[in-house]
Amino acid sequence: MLMSIGISLLFGVMKIVNFAQGTIVLLGAYILYTLESQFKINPLVFMPASILVGTIVGYVLYLFSITPLIKRKDFENQTMLVTFAAFLVLQNMILLIWGPAPQAIVSIFSVTGLHLFGHVFLPESYFITFIATLVGLLLLYFVLFKTNFGRAVRAISQDVSGAMLMGININSTYMLSFALATALAGAGGAMVGLVYSFDPNFGFTLLLISFGIVAVGGLGNLKGTAIASIIIGIVQSFTQYYAITYTNGVIYATILLAILIRGRLTH
């Protein structure tokens, strides 16, 4: 969910699509895995490290790749190419550092949980990621609706020229928005690492699902994206239990069906 909201946030503010978001999520998962494997303590302690890495990667990517393109007429198209290149670079960096083998974070949260309906086991890690996501959404709401930065973000998303006339620093707001989106990706990566096994190619799968969620919820529509994320999450959970082999196929089919229904309702 947090990854999808980050993608939607960037499109709403800057009108760009960040393809690198998928590998930043994956990087957050690998950071959590590495620290947990090294120190053998509660992985929740290291979640801020994943968020910090996501923020730093986003800041560096914006500074060296996005900033030089801001004043170009084809800014949106150029940034798509740049962020896709960043996706490939980060994916190969992950492959070089951690190798191609799948990894998983095995903690106490993976083996403890609740038994529902007698035979359905729900690991504690699912509850943790649910609560962490809610906390992240509440913090995001506070930032966007209770701070000057949030007011600047909403003003720019509605009218860039008007925001400039009001004295809002467009470049700074863009930079902070980009860093916020990649921080959400880092947080999402930590949650992915708690629940799923992952390999260097997993970022592409996450990216496809996130783009589908954003398409269903509406580009730039954070509320719609959050609702679409919940729906897809429920579908994924049921499919993993009853027909795990077809999980991705069912998710893609659900996204396609939702897009078709949404298209019919808007016409």
Image (cartoon, grey):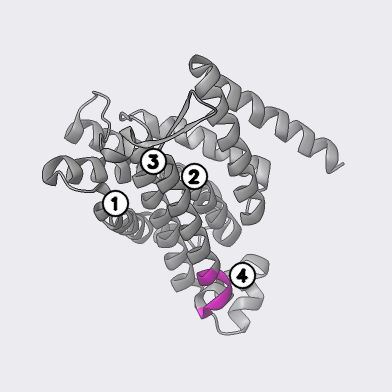
Which of marks 1 and 3 precedes in the sequence? Answer: 1
Counting from the top left corner in percent of width and height, residue 228 is at 64, 43
Q: What residue is pinned by disc 1?
A: 44
Q: Is mark 1 on a helix, strand or loop?
A: helix
Mark 4 vs mark 1, CA separation in Å: 32 Å
Mark 4 vs mark 3, CA separation in Å: 36 Å
Q: Which residue is drawn at 55% across and 66% down?
A: 141
Q: What residue is pinned by disc 2?
A: 80
Q: What secondary structure do most residues of the magenta stretch adopt? A: helix
Q: Relative to 110, does residue 24 appear above or below in the rendering? A: below
Which of marks 2 and 3 precedes in the sequence? Answer: 2
Q: Relative to 38, does residue 10 appear above or below in the rendering? A: below
Of marks 4 and 1, the one in the foreground:
1
Q: As shown in the figure, which amino acid type bears the numbered disc 3?
A: Glu
Counting from the top left corner in percent of width and height, residue 44 is at 29, 51
Q: What residue is pinned by disc 3?
A: 124
Splitting the image into 4 quarters, where does residue 86 fall?
top left
Q: Residue 154 carries which label?
A: 4
